[in-house]
Image (spheres, grey):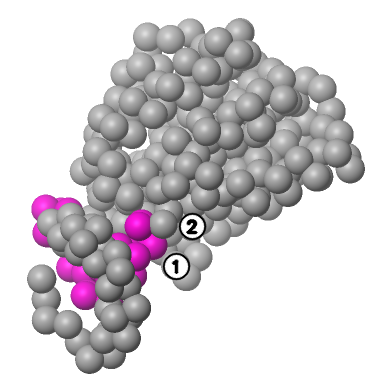
Amino acid sequence: MKKLKSTLLLIFLATTACSNSISDLEDKIETQAAKNNVEMSYAEIKKTAIYLDTWGKKDFYQETIDEFKEVDKATPPPDDLILFTGSSSIRFWSSLKEDMAPHTVLNRGFGGAHIAHVNYHFNEVVKPYKPKAIVFFCGTNDLAALKSPSETFSDFKTFYSMVKKELPGTKLIVIGVKPTIAREYLIQEEKEFNNLISILASEEDLLTYVSVWDPMLTNEGKPDPSLFVEDGLHINGKGYEIWTKLVRPQIENL
């Protein structure tokens, strides 16, 4: 582990109570970065470890889910809608209604959700809407939380099984994990996860996989900076234009 910089001493002392778990996470993050030939500063590793330590709790987003419920009470969603759910790349899709018009869509993406979070809140953010189709983007945060591609895929299979059981006949459209500047150290894991989803989709009539990977790369094979906001993780309007071109045809075919 890199030598602790003086500017991080207070952060280190403040997290002493959970130092064992934080230290383990730091080691895993550093190993993961080295595996993919990506340099991370000690500050980046420490910040990521502290965040991941609290991030994985299944009820982490209960407050957000309760807010959805209040909105639904005030303005009940229409029938026969297309539900978009998953993590923040869905949540921040501010032009979604316009991009998918005249189709009726509902955005229920939340925070930095893992697939396990969506599964935990399935009966609150998926099942009640009885959508005719679901567009799903999630998994990148799972991998960032150091779940393996196979573990993340297992969580996805749980989600898909819940859809088939509780909403039989509902089409599930999965947007594959996107390449990002902020998480280049996870590229191999992200590709492996995407491949697992793609294989499953080839075997399932109600499951469609939409790859956004190649269209978001430069000619040099790197994540295109022009598609991202400042954090290098979330996409901007130009990025969502690409997503719209890839996702909309699947909705038209419902």
As helix, strand or loop, the secondary structure at mark 2 comes to: loop
218 relative position to 210: left or right: left
Q: Is 201 inside the magenta-drawn segment?
A: no
- Above or below, comparing residue 37 to residue 187 in the picture: below
Measuring 72% from the left and 25% from the top, which residue is drawn there? 128
Judge by depth and name the residue closer to the eye, 138 or 73: 73
Cβ atoms under marks 2 and 1 closer than 8 Å: yes
- Quarter location, residue 106: top right
Residue at the limit of the structure toward the right, as seen here: 74
As helix, strand or loop, the secondary structure at mark 1 comes to: loop
Q: Is 41 inside the magenta-drawn segment?
A: yes
Magenta-highlighted residues: 32-53
2 relative position to 154: left or right: left
Measuring 41% from the left and 27% from the top, which residue is drawn there? 156
State the CA–CA distance, disc 2 to disc 1: 7 Å
- Disc 1: CA contacts within 10 A as few (<14), some (14-19) or many (>=20): few
In percent of width and height, residue 175 lies at: 47, 34
- Disc 2: CA contacts within 10 A as few (<14), some (14-19) or many (>=20): some
Q: Main secondary structure of the magenta part?
A: helix
Mark yes or no: residue 247 visible. Answer: no
Q: Amino acid at mark 1?
A: Asp
Residue under label 2, please give it.
234
Measuring 40% from the left and 48% from the top, which residue is drawn there? 56
- Where residue 231 is drawn, which disc sits there? 1
In percent of width and height, residue 174 lies at: 48, 29
Measuring 66% from the left and 44% from the top, which residue is drawn there? 65
In percent of width and height, residue 127 lies at: 66, 23
